[in-house]
Amino acid sequence: MNEWMRRSAMRISAIFGSPWSIAAALIAVGSLMLWMRVRGYSQELLWTFASWLTVVTFIMVFILQNAQNRHDRALQLKLDELLRAVEGARTQMVNLQGMSETDLEKLEADFKQLREQERRKHGALKSSAAQTGVTAADNG
């Protein structure tokens, strides 16, 4: 059942996420509007169309969410593998999605501080190179 659901969700999301399906939906809605204008406005037809549209939308939300969850999980596993493979990387980063909001905020502040240190360090190197007259062309 799980494998069938996975394959179905991936197929359906690929089909309904394509530009062709979006164009088909726009053509279908435009045709319905034109048909209703030519044939006369029918409250019953409008309610039928709205009901079917609601049902299809409701089902599509769950199908697309299933596909998105699988995509996110696969991407997360790939990133986890990269963190494990890179020497010097902090492997505690592997399960960030499971951390509390407070821990994520603290980690974000740590990274902000690291970026600021790198910016200052890079700025100091640039000003040092400018003072000595060394340019990138001189180095390479």
Image: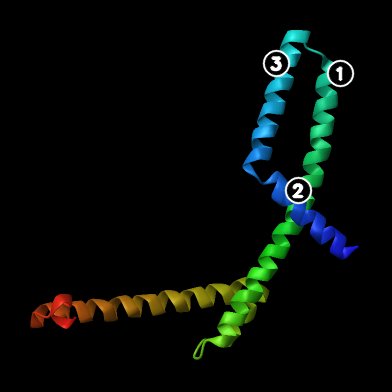
Give me the residue at 78% from left, 55% from top. Answer: 9
Q: Which residue has dot 3 on it?
A: 34
What is the crowding at mark 3: few (fewer than 14 residues within 10 Å), some, or many (at least 20)?
few
Question: Which mark is in front, 2 or 3?
Answer: 3
Above or below for 124 versus 22? below
Image check: 116 left or right of 131?
A: right
Image check: 53 left or right of 27?
A: right
Amino acid at the residue labelled 1: Glu
Task: For mark 1, give the secondary structure.
Answer: helix
What is the crowding at mark 2: few (fewer than 14 residues within 10 Å), some, or many (at least 20)?
few
Give the position of the N terminus as an image quadrant: bottom right
Specify the quadrant of the image occupied by residue 50: top right
Above or below for 13 versus 82? above
State the residue in front, 56 or 96. 56
Q: Which residue has dot 2 on it?
A: 61
| Residue 40 seen | no
- Disc 2 from disc 3: Cα separation: 28 Å
| Residue 6 seen | yes
Q: Which residue has dot 1 on it?
A: 44
Query: Percent from the top left, x then y, of residue 91?
Result: 58, 86
Give me the residue at 66% from left, 30% from top. Answer: 26
Task: For mark 2, give the secondary structure.
Answer: helix
Give the position of the C terminus as an image quadrant: bottom left
Specify the quadrant of the image occupied by residue 7: bottom right
Image check: 80 left or right of 34?
A: left
- Disc 1 from disc 2: Cα separation: 26 Å
Question: Which mark is in front, 3 or 1?
Answer: 3
- According to the image, what is the colour scheme of the structure? rainbow
Which badge, 3 or 1, comes first in the chain's sequence?
Answer: 3
